[in-house]
Image (cartoon, rainbow, N blue to C red):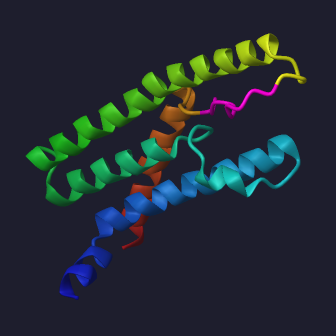
Amino acid sequence: MQDLADILNNRVLLVALVACFIAQALKLVIDVVKNQKLNVRVLVTTGGMPSAHSALVTALAAGIGQTVGWASPEFALATVFAIIVMYDAAGVRQAAGKQARILNQMIAELFDEKHEFSQDRLKELLGHTPVQVIAGSALGVTIYWLARTAY
C-alpha cells in the first residue's frame, strides 16, 4: 500500500497528468466552439489542439528539472523523451494521418455507395501540426509553473 501512496504523492507525476487532462478538456472546448455541438469522443482521441502528449511530457520534464536539478541525468532523459514524443506527434503520426486521408478518399472514389466494402475508414486525425505541439508544450510548462507557485 505504501507504493500506491508514494505514487499518489508524486507531485511531478500528478502535475504532468493534470496538464494532459487539461489539454484534453481544452480540445473539447475548442471542438464545441468550432462545431457548435458536444462531442465527448474528443476527450479520448489523438490529434487536435493543443497536443496533450506535448503538455504531458513538457510538464514532466519541467517537474523533473525543478525537483532533481536542471543538470541531472533524469532531466536530460525526460527532455530527450519529450523531444521524441513531440517529434513523433508532429512528424510520423501527422504523416500517417495524411496517408489515411488520401487512402480514405481513394476508397470513396473507387467504390461508390452501392459497393460493399467491409473495411472501416482509417483514422485521419492521428498527429499534430507544429502549432498544436508548441501550444501543448507551452500549456505543459504553464501548468507546471502554476502548480509550482501554488505550493
List x then y, in percent, for residue 138: 47, 42
**Residue drawn at (31%, 32%), measured in percent from left and top?**
84
List x then y, in percent, for residue 46: 56, 42
Q: In the shown orientation, is residue 19 left or right of residue 120?
A: left
**Residue drawn at (49%, 33%), measured in percent from left and top?**
134
Quarter the C terminus occupies: bottom left
**Residue drawn at (84%, 22%), measured in percent from left and top?**
115
> Measured along the vertical axis of the image, is residue 151 above or below residue 123?
below
> Measured along the vertical axis of the image, is residue 72 above or below residue 80?
below
Q: Is residue 118 magenta?
A: yes
Query: Is residue 72 visible to us here?
Result: no
List x then y, in percent, for residue 110: 78, 11
Q: Is residue 108 magenta?
A: no
> Measured along the vertical axis of the image, is residue 126 above or below residue 43?
above
Q: Which residues are magenta?
A: 116-125
> Majority secondary structure of the magenta segment?
loop
Quarter the N terminus occupies: bottom left
